[in-house]
Amino acid sequence: MLLAYLALAGRIFLTGYERIIFKQAGRSFGSEEAVFIIFLTGTVFLLPASIQETKGQHLAIKGMAELEKDGMEASLWLVGDVAAGGKKEYLEMLHRLVQDSDLNGHVQFLGWHEDMYGVMAAADVVMLCSATESFVLVLAEAMVLGKPCIGARIGGIPEVIENEKTGLLFDPGSLESLRGAMAGLAENRELRERYG
């Protein structure tokens, strides 16, 4: 069956009947009029934060590289843009890191999205890798949607994530600790459902 679609800036937007068909084959989010479809396999980790070094997107990408080395099927969605006055060099470095780690099919830079609830609903796990953070509303919102969360043991994150009950905490800045948390949820759907 041939379906018509409109590709905008590398993104596929579908309407009506096509949405129903494509939802069965891939992950989708968006309004009823426009749906963003991404075809991925495995566990989808979502990191929703402005693109800046203190938010730790580089650590999440390195965590994905570790999962890939271990043969685990997973993908990472980075949702957010460089903050006003922020460093675009960091975003460029993240793209190079994805390329150098051979993760082109596993890491998606989705930019900023108005429909954050839709994006979270399409993901399996919501994570934050921040080096500093106060109260984290996005994790509380993820929990309302029944999503397990991963976050560093810093600031207000441990007040939101109850370790091994609503998600997993990792040691700030520790790739080994983050990898363990990601692997635990990537490998175990039952655990994701229990924490969600």
Image: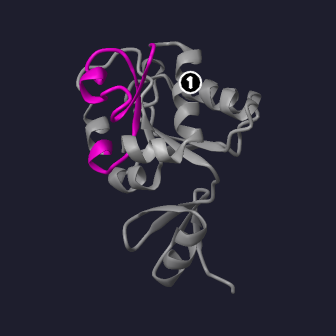
Disc 1 residue type? Gly
Taking the spot 38% from the left edge, 57% from the top edge, the residue there is: 118
Is 148 contained in the magenta span? yes
Taking the spot 71% from the left edge, 37% from the top edge, the residue there is: 103
Is 181 placed left or right of 40 in the picture? left
Is 48 contained in the magenta span? no
- Determine whether 88 is above or below 195 in the image: above
Q: Position of residue 105 (x, y in %)?
A: 70, 46
Circle 1 is placed at which residue position?
180
User: Residues in magenta?
Assistant: 142-171
Is residue 61 in view from this perspective? yes
Viewer-proximal residue, 191 or 30?
191
Mark 1: which secondary structure?
A: helix
Taking the spot 75% from the left edge, 30% from the top edge, the residue there is: 69
Res 34 quadrant in image = bottom left
Q: Position of residue 180 (x, y in %)?
A: 56, 24
Q: Position of residue 112 (x, y in %)?
A: 42, 45
In the picture, the quarter occupied by the C terminus is: top left
Taking the spot 30% from the left edge, 43% from the top edge, the residue there is: 143
